[in-house]
Amino acid sequence: MSDNLRRRRVTAAIALGASGLATLLGLATLAAILWTLFSRGLAGLSLSVFTQTTPAPGSSGGLINAIYGSVVMTLLGLAIGAPIGILAATYLSEYGRGQRLSTVIRFINDVLLSAPSIVIGLFVYTLVVLRMGHFSAIAGAISLGIIVIPVTVRTAEDMLRLIPSSMRQASAGLGAQPWRTITRVVYPAARSGLLTGVLLALARISGETAPLLFTALNNQFWSAKLNQPMANLPVVIFQFATSPYQNWQSLAWTGALLITLFVLALSVLARLVSSLFGTSESRIE
Amino acid sequence: MAAVTIPYKLQLRREARSERVFRVFATAAALLVLALLAGVLLALLYGAWPALKTFQFGFLTRTVWNPVTEQFGAFAALYGTVVTSLIAMILAVPVAFGIAVFLTETCPMWLRTPISTCIELLAAVPSIVFGIWGLFVLAVMVLPFITSVMREVFLATPRSLKEAAYGLGATQWEVVWDVVLPNARAGVVGGIMLGLGRALGETMAVTFVVGNAHRISGSLLAPGTTISASIANEFTEAVGKLYTSSLIALGLLLFVLTFIIIAGARLLLLRLEARGAQL
């Protein structure tokens, strides 16, 4: 074997070995994150987390008001954003297919998809919080809803496009107007795909902190009023983790563990649903 | 004739009306996406106006950030944002490239899906969790995004190109470096820019670790600040119109910055897609 060939082979072995190491590094990072979360989060996990409200520094308490607030605002955000997202995707995939406007909207949507979420928070602050005069749960829900829209548009359009046009033509051939075809044929056929999109959107907003900081703010006490500041897990984690109090930090880890488990479960579920649908995984960035 | 059936013509008219309504709603929802972008831009511009009017272009270049004397400049935060993002990219890009190569070339088939799922799950971990986890956060956060784009464009390399290279006696690495990578160039750059856009706008993870000191420090270990960290830390405590307005102006700056980078990345990827469609 010539020296030249040997050198090339050694280079190849080193480079490909390094790429394997990079993969190990990535996997190890995920493992390390989960390990830290579990070891520090499980310590504070007890029944009182789900029964008591957030404590004052030094005393005991739980996270129930934050969990409640997160659930309420996340669901409201989903209720605001998902229908708009699916309708917009319907336009892109059904009515506006091949039109220049659709290309522009798709492009802008992709930009919104990656826009910094704290900017969305500022937007809702100037639009809603300043008008109302105070922070509120509904403002938090609106900012989450705005983040849901681009995520849903992207996945829903991909899913609707997968429906074969022969099905649409068959429906049209029976004399159905487009809207009837869409609601009776296309949506049902794309059902699990649309569900995947909504689940991914849910996963995306569950951990969002930045847009809630100055919309929903936080609330140390139990509150179910939508026009008042409301506690929520991400902001509580932020506040407690940066505090010097030991019991707050411990609760922050527990909260982080809860959110991560929830989001990971959602992502896995979304993958399951979409693989049952029998399509290649959707492109979500 | 049965009295209960709706006359045929009436039914047709109803269908047509429903069709119009549905179509209007769908179109409105699609236009809302456009309006959202314009709305964000306008609202931020409106909020930032007092600060922009007071400091004018000096806002971009001055490092002073003093709420007491109401003197505000964005340069320290801008510098922090760019520097932290660049460091993150320098760390993340080689690793992402390595993972993408491993997943598309050397990894045994049965391991590919589980490993790429794990890497993508890294993207699902909420950023606030990365934050309390600590250092190198940004690099880890953008890693899955860059990896998945790279993997996709690597996979899109035509088989015949690779086989031709192998036929000439190229090693596996030479095929990756001299055939796959040049062929996927635009996609790789697009993926890196998408990651950069993410890193620039990421708030929570950075806020935990970067500190909040509006100054430019030669040392990377001294506390600094980024645009998003400043907003997150100071916004609710900001008193005075000019202070709040300056923070919103920071947000506007961030939005424009990420907009340019993300739009650039998307255009690159879009052109790549169009080329792929032609082939």
Image (cartoon, rainbow, N blue to C red):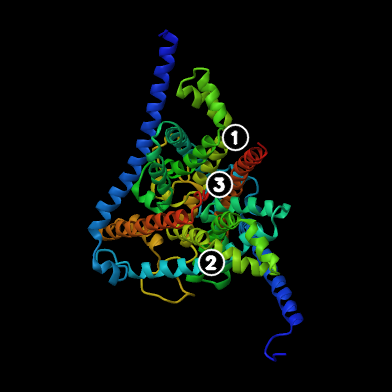
Query: On what subunit does the disc labeled 2 rest?
Result: A
Instruction: Specify few, some or many for label 1: CA neighbours under 10 Å numbering under 14, 14-19, or 20 or more.
Output: some
Callout 2 and callout 1 share a chain = no
Residue A129: image quadrant is bottom right
Residue furthest to the right in view is B9
Residue wearing tag 2:
A142
Closest to the observer, A214 or B213? A214
Residue wearing tag 3:
B74
Query: On what subunit does the disc labeled 3 rest?
Result: B
Q: Determine the CA span between mark 2 and mark 3.
A: 29 Å
Vertical position of residue B24 compared to residue B152: above or below:
below
Q: In this orientation, does residue B32 appear?
A: no
Q: Secondary structure at mark 3?
A: loop
Please state which of the two labelled residues, at mark 2 or mark 3, is closer to the viewer.
2
User: Label 3 is placed on what type of residue?
Assistant: Ala
Quadrant that contains the C terminus of chain B:
top right
User: Label 2 is placed on what type of residue?
Assistant: Ile
Q: Secondary structure at mark 2?
A: helix
Whether residues under marks 1 and 3 lie with C-beta atoms below 8 angstroms apart, the answer is no
Q: Determine the CA span between mark 2 and mark 1.
A: 36 Å
Closest to the observer, B224 or A213? A213
Residue B18: image quadrant is bottom right
Q: Determine the CA span between mark 1 and mark 3.
A: 32 Å
Residue wearing tag 1:
B186
- Is tag 1's residue or tag 3's residue first in the polypeptide sequence? 3
Residue furthest to the bottom in view is B3
Residue A6 percent location from the top left of the image: 40, 13
User: Label 1 is placed on what type of residue?
Assistant: Ala
Question: In the picture provided, is B105 more to the left or to the right than A59?
Answer: right
Residue B60 percent location from the top left of the image: 60, 44
Closest to the observer, B42 or B46? B42
> Looking at the image, how many numbered discs can be counted on the residues?
3
